[in-house]
Amino acid sequence: MGLLHIPTEKQVEVLNTLKSHFKIEELLYLNTCNRVELYIKNNLPLNSSTLIEIINIISPNITNSDLIELCAQAEVYQNELAVKHLFKVASSLNSLVIGEREIITQVRKAYENCQALELTGDFIRLLIKQTIEIAKDIYTNTNISKNPISIVSLAYRRLREIGIKNSDRFLIIGSGETNTLMGNYLKKHKYANFIIFNRTVSNASNLAKALDANIYSLNELNNYKGGFDVIIICTAHTGIIINHDTYKNLLGGDKSKKVIVDLSMPSNVSKEVAELNTLHYINITSLKNKAEQNIELRKNEIEKCEKIISEKITEFNQLHKERRIELAFGEIPKQVKAINQLALSEVFAKEIDTLDENGKIVIEKVLNYIEKKYNAVAIKTAKELLLKPRN
């Protein structure tokens, strides 16, 4: 999954290359802790060769074996199935933890980012609007998020089971959304001893302020001698940040049992750290069993959510058709207004000049009224004709 991660500073270049190379009309890039998804609007043939081209543009240095594995694992949805998939993603039905609400924020932010990069258009705007409304409907009218257990809360519960104390020292590596949630969650539960390491110090300032923590550059991690009890790490970096030597340096001879919470995808902690040291190691994989238990507990709610989504797909299809008609008729109001102006300024100019000011005002009001009513009737008639079910 990390092979398809596009760093923020590279997204303009990579996504615009994708859009121009395949002549894509609209594009949405969604990247979360356990998924990378592309939503594409155009007639692009989604066969294996297209998939290979897309992956090579996103990850040009990928090995052939990784490329084959990614192609084999990739899920491809088209048309209505793609819409249904996004509805399920935003409603957390495809999440590691069913009912977690973070995903709806991630979908919204992904859209806002791609919109700012001018990658999206009217269709994805309408799709995301409906997606967010459906997700809110599901969270409100089902028990899918009752007693929500997100990755963050699962990790916190595991820490409580281990027996961490409020006086314990936390090293937080990375200041992204997951670690921000984790840090705020810990602070809410009265933990207060935090040190933050981040690749860009300025990007961690908000989290540091919230946690009353000092910030260090990630480059200084190997030299840190302040000690720790718990490491929480989640970064966008696709390689190893904590190897065996780095971990030994951080220990500084401390023999007490430590805790590492590695929420990165792929892992930022080398296997040797967990294998060669006595510690509690928590990662996404270790949380998966608990998440699967939650899925079992919420199966009845999933069925309710699926029903809502099926109903909403029909509604979305109708909205999309109506929007296409509105866009197709978008030029008519301009043309009618031009005819209106022509009538006033040229065709009936002499006759209108014979009227007093009140008469001219009345004529203009009448024409404006007819203009508005005509536009409304034209679009309404088109919708009735084109959207009426055929016998």
Image (cartoon, rainbow, N blue to C red):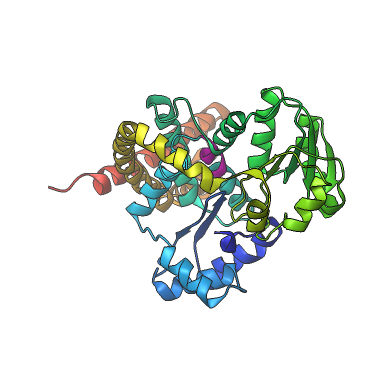
Q: Nearer the viewer, residue 319 or 136?
A: 136
Q: Nearer the viewer, residue 209 or 218?
A: 218
Magenta segment boundaries in residue numbering: 101-106
Q: For the stretch drawn in magenta, what is the main secondary structure? A: helix
Report if residue 92 is visible in the image: no
Horizontal relation, residue 239 to residue 245: left or right? left
Residue 260 point in image, percent of width and height = 67, 43
Horizontal relation, residue 325 to residue 347: left or right? left
Report if residue 328 is visible in the image: yes
Q: Nearer the viewer, residue 202 or 241?
A: 241
Residue 390 point in image, percent of width and height = 16, 48
> Residue 189, relative to residue 293: is it above or below?
above
Residue at (44, 33) in percent of width and height:
369
> Residue 146, relative to residue 90: is it above or below?
above
Q: Residue furthest left?
A: 391
Residue at (47, 69) in percent of width and height:
69
Horizontal relation, residue 237 to residue 150: left or right? right
- Whether 343 is among the magenta residues is no
Q: Residue furthest front?
A: 255
Residue at (54, 35) in percent of width and height:
154
Q: Quadrant of residue 58 in the image?
A: bottom right
Residue 133 point in image, percent of width and height = 44, 34
Residue at (37, 27) in percent of width and height:
142
Horizontal relation, residue 277 to residue 36: left or right? right
Q: For the N terminus, give its image quadrant.
A: bottom right
Q: Nearer the viewer, residue 75 or 257?
A: 257
Residue 212 point in image, percent of width and height = 81, 30
- Whether 104 is among the magenta residues is yes
Q: How many marks?
A: 0
> Residue 91, relative to residue 115: is it above or below?
above
